[in-house]
Image (cartoon, grey):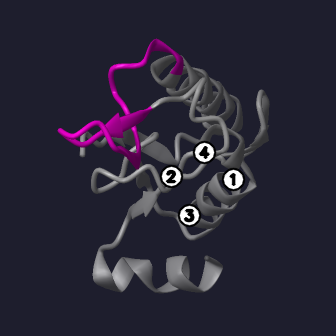
């Protein structure tokens, strides 16, 4: 990360994919995001972070394993014939609440980490 940020000014690159690891429900690890913010700050860059939540390119590849393993609590979308696919349905309150909890925790974390320096200038919520 530091090497990429060292070269970023010459490419005018300042956007990073935002990640929030939740290995267990309610326990968050924001170390990748912290590293990105701190490295950008060290290199005098401002950053725009991208948030995909449960879906990226329509797939649920960023959902934590404990969500992926519990398709009853976190239902999947279904094909027209009723066959489930490996994509969380957007029509589930449980899926929506899980996304909201991690996003809320991440925003509080970024505020605490970056409130003074203001390295993060925007969070772009993707709607893929």
Q: Indicate the quadrant where residue 3 lies.
A: bottom right
Q: Mark 4 vs mark 1: which is more N-terminal?
A: 1
Q: Name the residue tied to disc 4.
A: 68
Q: Residue at x 60, y 21 (%)?
A: 101
Q: CA distance from mark 4 to mark 2?
A: 20 Å
Q: Are marks 3 and 4 in contact (CB under 8 Å)?
A: no
Q: Name the residue tied to disc 1.
A: 34
- Nearer the observer: mark 3 or 4; the answer is 4
Q: Mark 4 vs mark 2: which is more N-terminal?
A: 2
Q: Mark 2 vs mark 1: which is more N-terminal?
A: 2
| Residue 102 point in image, percent of width and height | 61, 30
Q: Residue at x 54, y 29 (%)?
A: 74
Q: Indicate the quadrant where residue 78 lies.
A: top left
Q: Residue at x 34, y 85 (%)?
A: 10
Q: Indicate the quadrant where residue 25 lies.
A: top right
Q: Mark 1 vs mark 3: which is more N-terminal?
A: 1
Above or below for 6 versus 100:
below
- Nearer the observer: mark 2 or 3; the answer is 2
Q: Mark 3 vs mark 4: which is more N-terminal?
A: 3
Range drawn in magenta: 76-94
- Nearer the observer: mark 4 or 1; the answer is 4
Q: Name the residue tied to disc 3.
A: 40
| Residue 14 point in image, percent of width and height | 38, 64
Q: CA distance from mark 3 to mark 4?
A: 32 Å
Quadrant placement of the N terminus: bottom right
Q: Residue at x 36, y 53 (%)?
A: 59
Q: Secondary structure at mark 2?
A: loop
Q: Name the residue tied to disc 2.
A: 18
Q: Secondary structure at mark 1?
A: helix
- Nearer the observer: mark 4 or 2; the answer is 4
Q: CA distance from mark 4 to mark 1?
A: 25 Å
Q: CA distance from mark 1 to mark 3?
A: 10 Å
């Amino acid at each position: 990360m530091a090497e990429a940020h060292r070269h970023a000014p010459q490419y005018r690159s300042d956007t990073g994919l935002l990640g929030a690891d939740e290995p267990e429900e309610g326990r968050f690890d924001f170390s990748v995001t912290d590293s990105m913010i701190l490295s950008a700050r060290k290199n005098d860059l401002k950053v725009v972070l991208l948030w995909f939540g449960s879906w990226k390119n329509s797939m649920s590849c960023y959902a934590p394993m404990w969500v992926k393993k519990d398709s009853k609590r976190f239902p999947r979308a279904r094909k027209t014939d009723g066959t489930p696919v490996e994509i969380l349905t957007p029509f589930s309150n449980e899926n929506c609440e899980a996304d909201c909890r991690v996003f809320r925790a991440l925003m509080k974390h970024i505020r605490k980490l970056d409130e003074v320096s203001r390295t993060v200038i925007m969070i772009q919520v993707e709607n893929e």
